Amino acid sequence: MRSRFSAFVVGDEGYLLRSWHPDTRPPGIDFDPELRWGRLEILGSTDGGVFRNEGTVEFRAHYTVHGRPGALHENSRFTRVDGAWVYVDGVITD
């Protein structure tokens, strides 16, 4: 999760697409040039250990857009594909 957040911060589309599950991966990522990611809070996680193949991460990602602060709160699902953790999907909460 932290590596994907860092990739959003620097606009690393290649990494984001490689770390996205092939069944849910978009063809590309449309970065908003006005959006600046600031910090990431990991609020919780389930499973995802060394001997697991699925897990979740609840996070809050803080940003500014057009000078106004905001936050994205999401519960994300991850799974292993060929031994690597990849993002499957997420549910955005308030």
Image (spheres, rainbow, N blue to C red):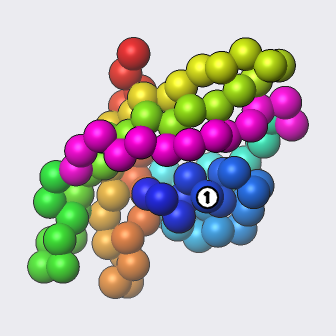
Q: Which residues are magenta?
A: 33-45
The amino acid beneath tag 1 is Ser
Instruction: Tell which residue pokes out farthest to the bottom in this image.
Output: 83
Viewer-side residue, 40 vs 45: 40
Q: Residue at x 16, y 52 (%)?
A: 46
The residue pinned by badge 1 equals 6
Quadrant into which the N terminus falls: bottom left
Give the percent coordinates (x, y) of residue 65.
76, 23
Instruction: Tell which residue pokes out farthest to the right in this image.
Output: 33
Q: Is residue 63 magenta?
A: no
Give the percent coordinates (x, y) of residue 85.
38, 70
Tell me if 9 is positioned left or right of 75 in this view.
Answer: right
Q: Residue at x 13, y 79 (%)?
A: 51
For residue 6, above or below residue 68? below
Name the main secondary structure of what is drawn in magenta. strand
Tell me if 51 is positioned left or right of 71 in this view.
Answer: left
| Label 1 Cα crowd, 10 Å radius (few <14 / some 14-19 / many 20+) | some
Q: Residue at x 80, y 19 (%)?
A: 67
For residue 93, above or below residue 75? above
